[in-house]
Image: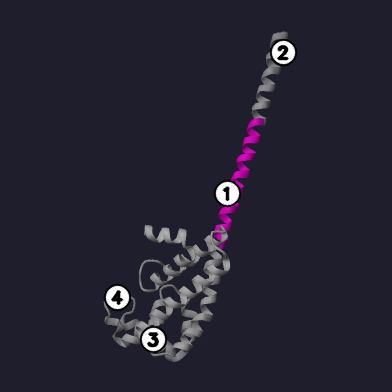
Amino acid sequence: MLQLSSLLEHFPYAGLFILLILGGIGLPFPEDTTLILCGFLISHTIVKPVPALLAVYSGLLVADLFLFYVGRKYGRMIVTHKRFHKILSPERLSMLEDKFNKRGVLVILFGRHLLGLRAQIFLVAGVMRMSALKFLLTDAFTSLFTIAMMVGAGYIGGNSLQIIKKDISRIEHVAIFLIVIFLALFFFFRYIRSGRKQSL
């Protein structure tokens, strides 16, 4: 984990790319979290928008293609694979095969945005031996919306934090100013009262 943090710090573009690949092969680095992180880094000018977006877009597609080719390699035996049987059960495989037969690429276009279903859909697309080019073009198109939503959320969140910090700083300055005025008035009226008492 420390090595990944160091990678993100020194090589943020490669770090974002690798996180998406690792998430794609089943390690605990969720795609959405990485995309939100990308938006956050952009908002804080830690990374530049164009190379960062290219890094996450290419990483996302490579991870999706990996799952597609795993499904294509193992076919229906994927449900017994030691790593992927936890992702795709025989019942879910049959259900998604039926969806693909009825709706084709629409399953990828809409299913890609469902966190729990995403990896399963890519595996089943491979199992059903969909054309690799057809899969890539469909996934490349619908991924643009995933990136726009998640990176956008991270960017807005990052900007919100900056705004909150500025607001807090302003509030602190106003509070200090009011305290100074209050103390000045307090000592002023205290001085006037003491002067009146002495005159009496």
Rounded to the nearest whole Å, what is the CA distance between mark 3 and mark 4? 16 Å
Amino acid carrying mark 4 in the image: Arg
Q: Are marks 1 and 2 in contact (CB under 8 Å)?
A: no
Magenta: predominant secondary structure element? helix
Nearer-the-camera pick, 5 or 150:
5
Q: Which residue is identified by label 4? A: 83
Q: Residues within 10 Å of mark 2 (few under 14, many from 20)?
A: few
Q: Which residue is identified by label 1? A: 165
Instruction: Count every numbered label the image shows and give the total.
Output: 4
Give the structural element (helix, strand or loop) at label 3.
helix
Rounded to the nearest whole Å, what is the CA distance between mark 3 and mark 1? 48 Å
From the viewer's perspective, is residue 189 above or below residue 137? above
Q: Nearer the viewer, mark 4 or mark 2?
A: 4
Q: Which residue is identified by label 3? A: 126
Q: Are marks 3 and 4 in contact (CB under 8 Å)?
A: no
Nearer-the-camera pick, 148 or 43:
43
Q: Are marks 3 and 2 in contact (CB under 8 Å)?
A: no
Q: Nearer the viewer, mark 1 or mark 2?
A: 1
Rounded to the nearest whole Å, what is the CA distance between mark 4 and mark 1? 44 Å
Give the structural element (helix, strand or loop) at label 1.
helix
From the viewer's perspective, is residue 191 above or below residue 120? above
Task: Based on the picture, tell me whether residue 160 belongs to the magenta stretch.
Answer: yes
Q: Are marks 4 and 1 in contact (CB under 8 Å)?
A: no
Earlier-in-chain disc, 3 versus 1: 3
Residue drawn at x 63%, y 44% is: 170
Q: Which residue is identified by label 2? A: 196
Give the structural element (helix, strand or loop) at label 4.
loop
